[in-house]
Image (tube, rainbow, N blue to C red):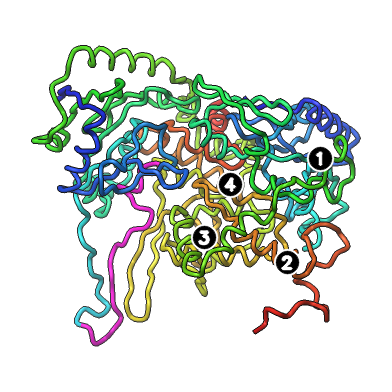
């Protein structure tokens, strides 16, 4: 089973229990232990008893901000750095009222990528033990030790903001702000390709897509009441797994996230067939960061980059 | 009929390559980090030494996207505005199917082959008829396997024409049907079974069967009134963390809902049938815009009531074979075993 972060788990339980007892909030959105290894499950606690079942470990990757849009109740939410930035985005886009939220911020040192572990262990039945910077993986009678940093999600390795950007209460102490690896690594690989190579790469990458929309539905930005992919009049893209329709869906969706994506990795984590959607969204996140000096969701006061025109906006790309 | 033979593991690739000369061969193949069922052009592409495939082999009998007919709206054409049938599917063998997935084919049969008076699905049936299913028993079931709860077994033979049992450097080949026999006729590789291998297969089977936990009870669901289950307060909390994506339905060996769409470029069109998912907001939206299942909760409830209540009422079996894929793949860890437990209280 999953290796529990006992210290933070206890703190979260205590905060959640207190907020519910004081009736500060109607519910706390957090995690409970998963029913299988390598994943912890999002949960909604409404009673002190349920709050006592909350949990924290390195498998709490799901971006809980996804559960916020259109909620009217008073909610406390456990938020990592990336989750907190998604929350800021949702407040800025009028999807949730800040005054209805109590953000339990949790500094995060990275979430473990279940796909990486399964691939290393050659089995989904895994037991992990964390010892400092090393992790011992036990599976199928075999044991191996790997560096923790090697099995974190790609976006966690290159994370620039591990501490929550906005919070009402912090669990534990702030950690070093950046993950340490290059956030642009995944994109750099694609950027280095020629146009033909890149198109072939995307052809290959999306060839296993089954149009389950897990990437879209896991994304806290994808709250549209009706997604363009579901429109029928006009129908922007076909419904089948035709390679053109699949790519149109993914590329359009990525563009809809431009200037808003916090690189939380929800899309990649949710994909049942391991498509690295981040190669698209990461490029847009990078462009916005480099061209406009903007990182989405860092402040409640900031105007989103695509919502403002400034005379000094770069124009070199207009040919 | 039942006949036991053996084949050396090193001869499997040759056998599959030989079969590709006669028909389409579908087997587990590696695509990046995924193990998925797909056509092989050479037997060596088949990867049998692994746990079950990421997605069910359902696509081989009920393709995710299938051309039903073609048409032209060009008035000059002789067949203008007339639907034209598409070509017949090829003969195929689906190789390395786990017993749970083969049981899944039998669930699909119940839906698509209900007899002339009810419903017979031409597209499914003509493919089904031309398909041979070669199974591979599960020596090491996972903790998420619960086939035994629904009458299955890691070495179950329902829905199979041949069952392979991995006994180390060879497979024991149990030929179950005439179709299975026909596939092996005249092939190099399979030979007479030796008693040692048969005995070993028996031991492996026994230990695997013991390791599968049963205990997912659905017995009380059948007796409950539909509306009692429908209105059960359990749904108010069970659905809450579901994102309404299609991972569970699309990876499931038994989910079978589809949608029909015409796709056309200029005057040339094709009628497609694509998988649909009860998780999607478009699933039952009417042309009028009205949707009888407008909320996430409605759609979540539909999936489980269909599988464990409506299907059981209609076909006397649940539409789940305990493969555990939805448990492994759900991005938010919604566990069908817990949902069924609530339903069966």
Specify the quadrant that holds the N terminus of chain B: top left
**In the displayed structure, does residue B336 sit left or right of residue B14?**
right
A205 versus B158 height, above or below:
below
Q: Label 2 vs label 1: CA separation?
A: 26 Å
Judging from the image, what secondary structure is the residue with disc 4 in?
helix
**In the displayed structure, does residue B190 sit left or right of residue A314?**
left
Mark 4 — residue?
A270
Q: Are marks 3 and 1 in contact (CB under 8 Å)?
A: no
Q: Which mark sits nearer the N-terminus, 1 or 4?
A: 1
In the image, which residues are magenta?
B56-77
Q: Is residue B117 among what the camera can see?
A: no
Q: Which mark sits nearer the N-terminus, 2 or 4?
A: 4
Residue drawn at the location 49% of the way across and 68% of the way down: A237
Mark 1 — residue?
A106
Residue B344 position, x and y percent, is 53, 27
Q: Is residue B120 among what the camera can see?
A: yes
Q: Label 3 vs label 1: CA separation?
A: 40 Å
Residue A36 position, x and y percent, is 58, 29
């Amino acid at each position: 089973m999953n290796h529990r972060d006992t210290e933070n788990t206890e703190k979260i339980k205590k905060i959640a229990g207190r907020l519910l007892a004081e009736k500060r909030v109607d519910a706390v959105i957090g995690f409970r232990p998963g029913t299988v290894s390598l994943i912890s499950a999002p949960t909604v606690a409404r009673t002190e008893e349920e709050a006592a079942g909350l949990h924290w470990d390195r498998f709490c990757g799901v971006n809980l901000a996804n559960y916020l849009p259109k909620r009217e109740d008073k909610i406390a939410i456990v938020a990592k750095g990336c989750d907190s930035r998604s929350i800021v985005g949702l407040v800025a886009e009028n999807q949730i009222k800040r005054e209805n939220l109590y953000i339990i911020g949790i500094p995060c040192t990275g979430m473990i990528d279940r796909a990486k572990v399964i691939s290393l262990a050659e089995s989904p039945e895994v037991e992990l033990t964390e010892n400092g910077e090393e992790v011992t993986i036990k599976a199928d009678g075999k044991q191996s030790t790997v560096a923790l940093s090697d099995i974190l999600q790609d976006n966690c390795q290159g994370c620039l903001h591990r501490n929550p950007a906005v919070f009402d209460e912090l669990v534990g102490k702030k950690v070093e702000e950046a993950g340490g690896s290059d956030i642009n690594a995944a994109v750099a690989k694609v950027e280095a390709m020629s146009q033909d190579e890149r198109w072939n790469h995307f052809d290959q990458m999306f060839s296993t897509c089954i149009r389950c929309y897990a990437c879209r539905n896991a994304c806290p930005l994808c709250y549209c009441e009706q997604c363009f992919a579901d429109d029928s009049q006009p129908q922007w893209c076909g419904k089948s797994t035709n390679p053109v329709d699949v790519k149109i869906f993914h590329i359009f969706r990525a563009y809809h996230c431009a200037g808003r994506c916090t690189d939380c990795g929800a899309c990649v984590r949710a994909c049942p067939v391991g498509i690295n959607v981040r190669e698209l969204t990461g490029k847009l996140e990078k462009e916005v960061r480099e061209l406009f000096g903007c990182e989405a969701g860092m402040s409640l006061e900031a105007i989103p980059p695509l919502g403002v025109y400034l005379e000094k906006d770069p124009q070199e790309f207009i040919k | 009929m039942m006949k036991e033979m053996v084949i050396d593991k090193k001869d499997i690739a040759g056998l599959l390559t030989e079969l590709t000369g006669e028909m389409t061969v579908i087997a587990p193949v590696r695509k990046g980090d995924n193990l998925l069922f797909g056509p092989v052009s050479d037997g060596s592409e088949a990867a049998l030494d692994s746990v079950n495939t990421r997605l069910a082999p359902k696509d081989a009998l009920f393709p995710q996207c299938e051309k039903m007919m073609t048409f032209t709206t060009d008035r000059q054409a002789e067949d203008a505005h007339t639907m034209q049938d598409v070509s017949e599917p090829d003969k195929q063998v689906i190789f390395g199917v786990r017993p749970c997935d083969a049981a899944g084919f039998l669930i699909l049969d119940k839906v698509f082959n209900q007899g002339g008076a009810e419903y017979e699905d031409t597209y499914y049936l003509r493919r089904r008829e031309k398909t041979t299913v070669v199974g591979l028993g599960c020596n090491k079931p996972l903790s998420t396997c619960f086939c035994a709860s629904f009458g299955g077994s890691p070495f179950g033979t329902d829905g199979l024409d041949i069952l392979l049992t991995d006994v180390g450097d060879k497979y024991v080949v149990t030929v179950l049907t005439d179709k299975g026999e026909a596939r092996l006729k005249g092939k190099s590789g399979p030979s007479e079974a030796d008693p040692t291998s048969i005995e070993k297969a028996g031991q492996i089977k026994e230990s695997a069967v013991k390791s599968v936990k049963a205990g997912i009870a659905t017995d009380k669901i059948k007796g409950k009134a539909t509306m009692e289950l429908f209105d059960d307060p359990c749904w108010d909390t069970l659905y809450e963390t579901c994102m309404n994506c299609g991972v569970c339905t699309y990876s499931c060996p038994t989910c079978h809902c589809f949608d029909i769409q015409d796709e056309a470029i200029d005057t040339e069109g094709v009628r497609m049938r694509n998988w649909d998912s009860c998780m999607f907001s478009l699933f039952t939206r009417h042309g009028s815009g009205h949707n009888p299942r407008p909320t996430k909760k409605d759609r979540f409830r539909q999936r489980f009531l269909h599988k464990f209540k409506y299907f059981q009422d209609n076909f006397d079996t649940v539409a789940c074979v305990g493969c555990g894929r939805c448990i492994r793949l759900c991005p938010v860890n919604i566990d069908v075993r817990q949902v069924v437990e609530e339903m069966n209280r």
